[in-house]
């Protein structure tokens, strides 16, 4: 079975977000574990080969995969709120324990990573969001 890059990225994002449902995710895409492992190995080899190519910038295949993966992540669930990101960040700074911080807020690691990616760019570009995030960090 062959998949295009977008389908591969969609499955990878789903597996990252809901890893404990691996068999169900693969089955939804008409895959079993052995077939998926072969597909994944081929894509990983292609991505590795692309990274080894000489040239400036990010290889086209890697950039296309990153874009498809990000699109798939966004489709899975909306980003966490800025306040949830601040709460986890504050708890993490206080305890140094990521798992406990996430559990206290009721978030998965995948949701936190998606939220951090979503908000970090926006915070960097918007002084208003930066102030809102800093205020949320101070609230307790």
Image (tube, rainbow, N blue to C red):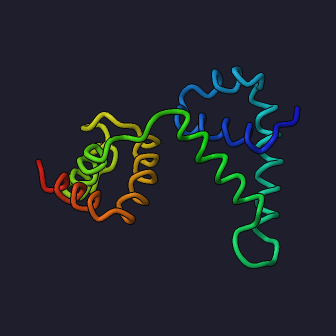
Q: Position of residue 69 (x, y in %)?
A: 63, 46
Front residue of 125/115: it is 125
The residue at the point 73 percent across, 25 percent down is 29
Q: Position of residue 23 (x, y in %)?
A: 65, 24
Q: Is residue 22 above or below residue 130?
A: above
Q: Is residue 78 above or below residue 122?
A: above
Q: Which of the 4 image quadrants contains residue 27?
A: top right
Front residue of 123/137: it is 123
Front residue of 23/135: it is 135
Q: Which of the 4 image quadrants contains residue 95?
A: bottom left
Residue 50 appears left or right of 122: right
Residue 106 appears left or right of 68: left
Q: Residue furthest right?
A: 1
Which quarter of the figure is the N terminus placed in? top right
Residue 131 appears left or right of 77: left
Residue 85 appears left or right of 24: left
Q: Which of the 4 image quadrants contains residue 83?
A: top left
Front residue of 47/81: it is 81
Q: Position of residue 51 (x, y in %)?
A: 75, 67
The residue at the point 82 percent across, 63 percent down is 49
The residue at the point 53 percent across, 29 percent down is 20
The residue at the point 74 percent across, 37 percent down is 7
Callout count = 0
């Amino acid at each position: 079975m062959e998949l295009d890059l977008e389908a591969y990225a969609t499955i990878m994002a789903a597996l990252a977000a809901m890893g404990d449902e691996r068999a169900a995710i693969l089955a939804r895409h008409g895959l079993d574990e052995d077939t998926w492992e072969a597909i994944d190995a081929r894509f990983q080899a292609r991505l590795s080969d692309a990274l080894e190519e000489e040239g400036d910038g990010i290889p086209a295949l890697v950039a296309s995969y990153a874009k498809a993966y990000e699109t798939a992540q966004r489709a899975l669930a909306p980003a966490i709120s800025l306040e949830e990101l601040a709460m986890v960040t504050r708890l993490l700074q206080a305890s140094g324990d990521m798992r406990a911080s996430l559990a206290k807020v009721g978030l998965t690691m995948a949701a936190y990573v998606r939220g951090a990616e979503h908000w970090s760019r926006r915070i960097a570009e918007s002084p208003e969001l930066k102030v809102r995030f800093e205020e949320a960090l101070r609230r307790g």
